[in-house]
Amino acid sequence: MNMFELLVLGIDLGIVLFAFGAAILSKDIIKSALSFGVGSAFLGVSFFLLSAPFAGAFEISIGAGLLTVLTISTISLVTYEDVPSISEEGEETLDKAEVKKPIKEELDKVDKKEEEE
């Protein structure tokens, strides 16, 4: 390995560390998944530079490609609803009462049945 290849490998591994650090420290899960994908892609390039083409191809296809796509698609399928919370006075507050009213009624029915038994 000559000096140029070592320099490219050092820069590549620096990008890998930066991307994985950004994935760990990011508060937004989409940005974290994208940072993980970028880090995995550059890690695959590092494997190619180290004369491990099969490991590089596997890392780029599975690590950067498949896992990133599955993570982002799973996140996009999850819907975020407001969860009932307890206020300081001990009262339950519902932000989306119209949506949750049927669910709350069904849960109340189940609670009443359990109390009767």
Image (cartoon, rainbow, N blue to C red):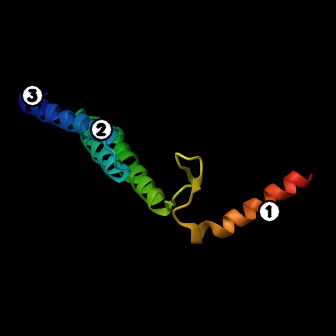
Q: Which mark is residue 2?
A: 3
Instruction: Name the element at disc 3.
Output: loop
Q: Is residue 110 above or below residue 67?
A: below
Determine whether label 1 and label 3 are within 8 Å by CB. Answer: no
> Which residue is located at x 42 percent, y 50 percent?
67
Q: Is residue 18 above or below residue 69?
A: above
Judge from the rendering whether residue 113 lies leftward or rightward of residue 102; answer left or right: right
Given residues 51 and 76, the one toward you in this image is 76
Closer to the eye: label 2 or 1: 1
CA neighbours of label 1 inside 10 A, class few (<14), some (14 to 19), many (20+): few
Furthest residue in direction right, as rendered: 117
Q: Position of residue 42 (x, y in %)?
A: 25, 42
Distance CA(mark 1)–CA(mark 3): 74 Å
As shown in the figure, which amino acid type bears the numbered disc 1?
Answer: Lys
CA neighbours of label 2 inside 10 A, class few (<14), some (14 to 19), many (20+): many
Mark found first going from the N terminus, 1 or 3 = 3
As shown in the figure, which amino acid type bears the numbered disc 2?
Answer: Phe
Say which quarter of the image contains residue 55.
top left
CA neighbours of label 3 inside 10 A, class few (<14), some (14 to 19), many (20+): few
Mark found first going from the N terminus, 2 or 3 = 3
Residue under numbered circle 2:
20
Residue under numbered circle 1:
109
> Which residue is located at x 53 percent, y 49 percent?
87
Q: Position of residue 94 (x, y in %)?
A: 56, 60
> Which residue is located at x 79 percent, y 55 percent?
111
Judge from the rendering whether residue 20 lies leftward or rightward of residue 58; answer left or right: left
Q: Position of residue 90 (x, y in %)?
A: 59, 47
Q: Which mark is residue 61?
A: none
> Which residue is located at x 68 percent, y 70 percent?
102
Closer to the eye: label 1 or 3: 1
As shown in the figure, which amino acid type bears the numbered disc 3?
Answer: Asn
Distance CA(mark 2)–CA(mark 1): 48 Å
